[in-house]
Image: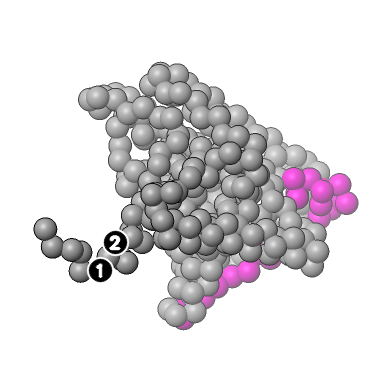
Amino acid sequence: MSEPKNPESSTILRAAHRLIGEDRTGLIAPDAPDRTMRFVAWVAVLSLFVLGWGSGTVRAVQVALGQDLTFGVVTDLSATIDIALRLAIAGTAWALVYVMRRASHSTPVRASWRTQAIVVPVAMAAAAAGFLLYRLISTIGGLTTHEYPDVEHETASSAVLDVIASMMAGPSEELALMALVVTALRTTGYSWTVVCITAVVVRVPFHLYYGWGAIGLGLWAVLIIALYRRTGALLGIITAHALFNGLNSLGDAGMVVKGTLIAVGSGIVLWRVWRLDRDPRNAEPLSG
């Protein structure tokens, strides 16, 4: 048998497969897909998306089409309602994930605390990669971009509540738009390709207020799916998203902490790739 034309490239591909190929979600796909369960899965995913981000998606598309991006004054009441809605979405998504896991006889993944801690900066690096691609697409394509505007707060307490609401994007989005998508579709027999496409479709639209280049945030969705598949560390992914948003409220100090965590996460990924590239047979699980 002839040797591969490029052994080095083959080694890199094997290393990449070892890095993200292991499925640690514990989800069990059915032997034969059930149409009724597939219908239920899609209803669950799309219903939560519409309830949680439907109006935001409409507004984001309007901004992408040229309307001004403005917000009213944030009050204690409006911020509290926002927090309550995100909690309700997160709780509902968690309940659906639990029920679907039980129905499919899937074994819950219990990632170690070490794994959860490692995943936090890695997941933040994944989000940063998505925003970097958004900037790149916008620059190369000459697309209009929008920054998130400063929001006026009625009181100091409403400002604090608004930060909490922003951080609640962690549990609400990662449970409803990531964990539920993975669980609902995988336990009804869909491929990881369908899972990734769906995750992009439900993650990108309500971010389009940044501009059409925000399609680049689809990379974030795919990387988070890959990270969840590889580690099962849902808590770490939720924490990373909450920190990614919350640190924005701490000014320069928050940006320094955020940048440091992103750099650490990028370093962890590069270190893992380097190790696997050297000897993919000696790859060790990311979990502790």
30 relative position to 158: left or right:
left
Which residues, given as a range, are shown in magenta? 142-164
In x, y percent, where is residue 206?
A: 52, 54
Badge 2 local density, few (<14 within 10 Å), some, or many (20+)?
Answer: few
Quadrant holding the C terminus = top right
In x, y percent, where is residue 25?
A: 45, 34
Q: Secondary structure at mark 1?
A: loop
State the residue position of label 1. 6
Q: Which residue is found at the position 43% from the left and 49% from the top? A: 282
Q: Are marks 2 and 1 in contact (CB under 8 Å)?
A: yes
User: Which residue is more in the foreground, 111 or 92?
Assistant: 111
Q: Main secondary structure of the magenta part?
A: loop
Q: Is residue 158 magenta?
A: yes
Vertical side of 33 occupied by 237: above or below: below
Q: Secondary structure at mark 2?
A: helix
State the residue position of label 2. 10
Kind of residue sitting beneath label 1: Asn
Vertical side of 127 occupied by 77: above or below: above
Q: Is residue 260 magenta?
A: no
